[in-house]
Amino acid sequence: MEASDLNTSVTTSSDGSSDVNSYLEQHKLLPLIENLTSAVLYAQPDDPKEFIANWLQELINARASTSISPPSLVEDSNLESLYNMLDITQRGVINAEQYKAAMSSLGVKSYNTTPLGATTDRISKETFLNEAQAALTHANSTYQEH
């Protein structure tokens, strides 16, 4: 069956906007497809379909359990390296501007903009790692919450 064979109906609201956008947002389909595409391109597996199936199974497992994080391309060691690059003087703290730049470079759109130490421009490595991991977990949770 080809896509053109599908009988699709798109309803339109009175203001002319499509319910398709609402559906895509509700089911987090665009972030899911973006994450899947990024993961496949990064890993370049021999069997991309099997890779995608495994990635989706990891998402299913993460949704079913609060102790399992969704799959991510960014590992803790990457976050530590990013922090260390920002803390070039090795003071053990970064400022709020550096923190926001780091979150932007991670590609996260939703994160705590005032973490512990932000008001004094003294964000510790521990705080940064916790906040970055939380933001990535949220960004990678490309499934509808129960």
Image (cartoon, rainbow, N blue to C red):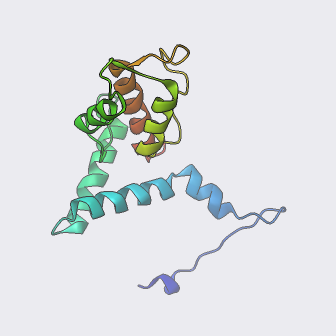
In the displayed structure, does residue 109 sit left or right of residue 45? Answer: right
Tell me residue 114's x, y (percent). 55, 22
Residue at the image point whose x is 60% and y is 57% from the top: 23
Above or below, comparing residue 145 to residue 122 in the picture: below
Residue 131 visible from this viewpoint? yes
Q: Residue furthest right?
A: 14
Question: What is the tally of numbered marks visible in this picture?
Answer: 0
The image quarter in which residue 83 lies: top left
Tell me residue 116's x, y (percent). 47, 15
Residue 146 visible from this viewpoint? no
Residue at the image point whose x is 31% and y is 53% from the top: 56
Above or below, comparing residue 43 to residue 102 in the picture: below
Tell me residue 13's x, y (percent). 78, 62
User: Which quarter of the image is occupied by the N terminus?
Assistant: bottom left
Above or below, comparing residue 48 to residue 139 in the picture: below
Q: Nearer the viewer, residue 106 or 94?
A: 94
The image quarter in which residue 9 lies: bottom right
In the displayed structure, does residue 115 sit left or right of residue 59? Answer: right
